[in-house]
Amino acid sequence: MRELDRNPATCPPSKRCAVIGAGRLGHALATALRAAGLEVDGPLGRGADPGPAGVVLLCVPDAEIAAAGAAVAPGPLVGHCSGATGLDVLAGHEAFGLHPLMSVTASGTARFAGAGCAVAGSTPRALDTAKGLASALGMHAVEVADEDRAAYHAAASIAANFLVTLEGAAERLAATAGVDRALLAPLARAALENWAELGAERALTGPVARGDEATIARQRAAVAERAPDVLELFDAMVAASRELVPA
């Protein structure tokens, strides 16, 4: 994995881009690319003719990338937005990957500036295209090789998707004590900021970090009584947290 210089002079070979896929990401990227000064067609439906665009960006589910790519006539550069998929699914095209390292909400809105972005290219020109699009959106491009995509995407899932799952468990348990999730949010934000600044080992606080086994036991008993579906997750997180504490 290699972070690339952000170079505002690097731009796509064509200022006209077609976005195929009218889901959350397709709408968000089309809107953001227009705001960045590119001519954007779409978001178009799958199988649509991208017209004269020199760059086609596929914002479709991973399982549909190959079919969507095959529907594009040879000529333009074709990219996908999957974090876990390599470029082999776009065989027959000069291909690139552009995966914004961020979440797009159900509203379809997103702020790309400042986010990371995994890029790849089957040719130097294709890689420059991915870098140019990332730069136009204000993102920090990082080149991720095909053989590293699964590990990269798993890390992203842990950092974002699983974090939401974990906070959901905390929310359910807190509700049994009459505590709303809004009161947990500042605590969660502070922990995340500390992790970003200090790393996991130095940011960890609480009874596991202190070696307070009596408190951990009382917590576990409460979880078992009030939210037994969370107990396995609680035990796993305690065990993982112990690995962070210096011996």
Image (cartoon, grey):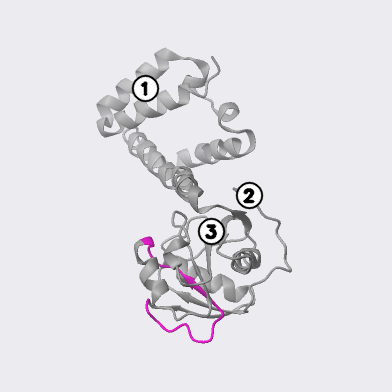
Q: Is residue 36 visible?
A: yes
| Kind of residue sitting beneath label 1 | Gln
The residue depicted at 45 percent of the width and 62 percent of the height is 88
Residue bounds of the magenta highlight: 46-62
Numbered mark located on residue 2 in the image: 2
The CA span between labels 3 and 2 is 15 Å
Relative to 242, residue 69 above or below: below
Is residue 180 shown to the viewer in this render?
no
Is 58 magenta? The answer is yes
Locate the C terminus and report the quarter of the image it occupies: top right
Query: Is residue 62 positioned above or below 167 on the image?
Result: below
Work out whether mark 1 precedes mark 2 in sequence or the reverse, and give the earlier one. Answer: 2
Q: Which mark is residue 100?
A: 3
Decide which of tag 3 and tag 2 comes sooner along the chain. 2
Q: Is residue 44 left or right of residue 192?
A: left
Q: Position of residue 58 (x, y in %)?
A: 45, 70
On the image, which quarter does residue 240 sit in? top left
Mark nearer the viewer, 1 or 2: 2
At mark 2, the secondary structure is: strand
Q: Nearer the viewer, residue 41 or 235?
A: 41
